[in-house]
Image (cartoon, grey):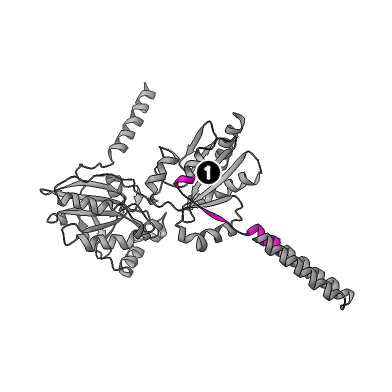
């Protein structure tokens, strides 16, 4: 849908530019081009910030944990109201931005679903989060907490690093070095 | 030899920490804590009741907020039947500044709490009970003058939406007690924020 909108805007601008260029001076033309360029930049930055937060439930979690691919998954459970989660969230974003095709960072957000628009999306903008964020909609937590790890009490932050062979669960706030080391261990043992 | 002492000391410490968690069937731990009205409230003040719904909760936690109205409702539904709510705020207000005594008073007044809202200033009561979350419920049963833990855990199985609840654990526990049975389940995972403490 966004692509279509983009195309429409593009052709519209092209049309308007052509019209204007016939009647305006060179100086004005230059100004207009600057405005047009600015508009494009805005459009692009808008698409980069367009936040998509999919919903996530017990079934999604089971499917994820059952993954048979070679990818290393780094799954972090967090919420905007959880101070230690916010302290560590940049490390996960940093991991994501390394762009390793065999590494996938997933931030499973535990704010109530009715807080996604008002709290979670603004938080993502503020912290410039580009890693995938999903919102847990399964409210019977007792159904899915044991699915993640049998040692987990449900306290956040919590992090699960896994691939098809093994799992590492971290049930506390994690330091940057500890996180990167843990991920590195998965990469080297593959 | 010294190392051995140290090791056994650590092990002993661990086992004490573990045994501090109350389990269903255990005797409840007596307490006396300051209420938002400035008066002291003790568990023994309730000796004429059939039981007590002891709720560890706090001001800012989203789960505590989501359950707040349901906690008030529990009191309204069960106080007259002999199971009043007693709420205890276990958070250290240095770590959680929204849980100061003043802010507890404001919240209790603002929301018209029909039950006492006590401050666990020394953070000893929640530890004695083994509460880990806000909210964390302990249904106590008055067994011939001795309070015993009958149920530990969540209020129900949907924190966000009371209308989507399919398991009303606390209500079912009281129902069981009223019928002379032990609650089943007697222990359910409590869902909420961690209790804030200075480590």
Of all residues shown, which one is farthest toward the right? A26
Q: Residue at x 27, y 49 (%)?
A: B125
Picture layout, residue B8 above or below residue A137: above
Q: Residue at x 55, y 38 (%)?
A: A178
Q: Residue at x 88, y 76 (%)?
A: A22
- In front: B160, or B99? B160
Asked if one can make out residue B81 in the rendered structure from this viewpoint, the answer is: yes
| Residue B150, image x, y percentages | 21, 46
Of all residues shown, which one is farthest toward the bottom? A23
| Residue A4, image x, y percentages | 68, 62
| Residue A120, image x, y percentages | 52, 58
Which chain does the residue under circle 1 lie in? A
Q: Secondary structure at mark 1?
A: strand
Picture layout, residue A28 above or below residue A89: below
**The quarter of the displayed image where residue B13 is located:** top left
> Considering the image in quadrants, where does the C terminus of chain A appear?
top right
Picture layout, residue B178 above or below residue B98: above
In magenta stretch: residue A52: yes
The segment highlighted magenta reads A43-60
Q: B95 left or right of B15?
A: right
Asked if one can make out residue B39 in the rendered structure from this viewpoint, the answer is: no
């Amino acid at each position: 849908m966004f692509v279509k909108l983009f195309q429409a805007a593009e052709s519209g601008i092209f049309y308007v530019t052509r019209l204007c260029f016939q009647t305006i001076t060179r100086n004005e033309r230059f100004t207009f081009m600057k405005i047009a360029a600015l508009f494009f930049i805005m459009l692009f930055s808008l698409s980069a910030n367009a936040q998509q937060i999919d919903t996530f439930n017990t079934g999604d979690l089971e499917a994820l944990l059952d993954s048979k691919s070679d990818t290393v998954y780094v799954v972090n459970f967090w919420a905007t109201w959880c101070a230690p989660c916010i302290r560590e969230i940049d490390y996960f974003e940093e991991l994501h931005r390394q762009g390793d095709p065999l590494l996938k960072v997933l931030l499973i957000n535990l704010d109530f679903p009715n807080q996604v628009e008002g709290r979670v999306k603004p938080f993502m903008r503020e912290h410039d989060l580009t890693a995938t964020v999903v919102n847990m909609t399964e409210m019977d937590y007792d159904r899915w907490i044991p699915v993640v790890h049998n040692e987990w009490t449900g306290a956040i932050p919590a992090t699960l690093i896994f691939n098809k062979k093994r799992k590492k669960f971290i049930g506390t706030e994690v330091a940057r070095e500890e996180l990167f080391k843990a991920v590195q261990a998965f990469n080297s043992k593959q | 030899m010294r190392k051995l002492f140290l090791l056994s000391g650590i092990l002993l410490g661990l086992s004490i920490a573990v045994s501090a968690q109350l389990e269903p069937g255990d005797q409840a731990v007596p307490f006396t804590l300051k209420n938002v009205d400035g008066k002291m409230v003790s568990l023994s003040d309730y000796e004429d009741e059939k039981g007590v719904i002891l709720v560890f909760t706090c001001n800012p936690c989203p789960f505590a907020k989501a359950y707040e109205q349901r906690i008030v409702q529990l009191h309204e539904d069960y106080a007259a039947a002999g199971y009043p709510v007693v709420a205890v705020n276990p958070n250290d207000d240095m770590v959680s500044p929204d849980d100061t005594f003043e802010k507890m008073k404001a919240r209790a007044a603002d929301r018209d709490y029909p039950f006492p809202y006590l401050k666990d200033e020394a953070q000893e009561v929640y530890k004695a009970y083994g509460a880990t979350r806000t909210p964390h419920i302990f249904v106590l049963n008055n067994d011939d003058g001795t309070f015993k833990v009958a149920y530990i855990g969540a209020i129900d199985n949907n924190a966000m939406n009371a209308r989507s609840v399919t398991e009303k654990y606390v209500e079912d526990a009281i129902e069981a007690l009223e019928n002379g049975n032990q609650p089943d389940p007697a222990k359910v995972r409590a869902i909420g924020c961690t209790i804030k403490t200075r480590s």
